[in-house]
Amino acid sequence: MGRMSDLAIEAMETPIMSPCPDCWGYGTVEVEIPRPHSPTRDVGVIDVRKEVCESCSGDGEMPRLCDCGEVVTVGMGEDAEKCEECVNDLSN
C-alpha cells in the first residue's frame, strides 16, 4: 500500500482523546478518608489523599465516545462528536 493509504487507515483507527471527566485531565483524584476521634482528641477529621484516577488509569485522557458507545476517530475530525457509523446513518 502507499503512504497516503496508510495515513488514511491510521486516521480511521486512532481515537480522539478527551480530558477525563473525573479528574479533569490531571490523572489523580482527591479521596476523602474519615478518621474517627480518639482518646486524645474529641472530634474526628476528614483527611484527603490523592489517588490515581480509576477512570483513566492516571493518563488524564479517555477516548471520546459517541452516543452509541463507539469510539470517535481522528478520521472524523478533531471536533467530531459522532462516530463514522452514526454519521453515515444520519445521512441516509
Image (cartoon, rainbow, N blue to C red):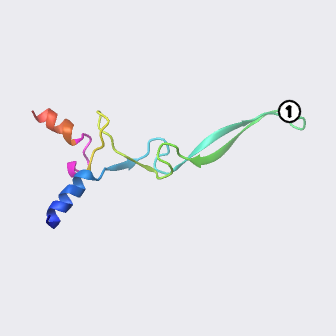
Horizontal side of 79 relative to 58 (left or right) equals: left
Q: Is residue 33 above or below residue 50?
A: above
Q: Which residues are magenta?
A: 74-83
Q: Of the residues shown, which amino acid type is indicated by label 1?
A: Asp
The residue that appears at 19% across and 61% down in the rendered structure is 6
The residue that appears at 65% across and 46% down in the rendered structure is 49
| Mark 1, secondary structure of its residue | loop
Residue 74, can we see it? Answer: no
Please identify the residue farthest to the left as the structure is shown.
92
The residue that appears at 28% across and 44% down in the rendered structure is 72
The rendered magenta stretch, by its main secondary structure, is classed as loop
Q: Is residue 91 above or below residue 79?
A: above
The residue that appears at 47% across and 46% down in the rendered structure is 56
Label 1: which residue?
A: 42
Q: Magenta segment: does it hold 84? A: no
Report x, y in % for residue 11. 23, 55
> Callout 1: few (<14), some (14-19), or many (20+) C-alpha neighbours within 10 Å?
few
> Quadrant where the C terminus lies?
top left
Q: Is residue 85 above or below residue 79?
A: above
Horizontal side of 44 relative to 32 (left or right) equals: right
Report x, y in % for residue 1. 14, 64
Q: Magenta segment: does it hold 77? A: yes
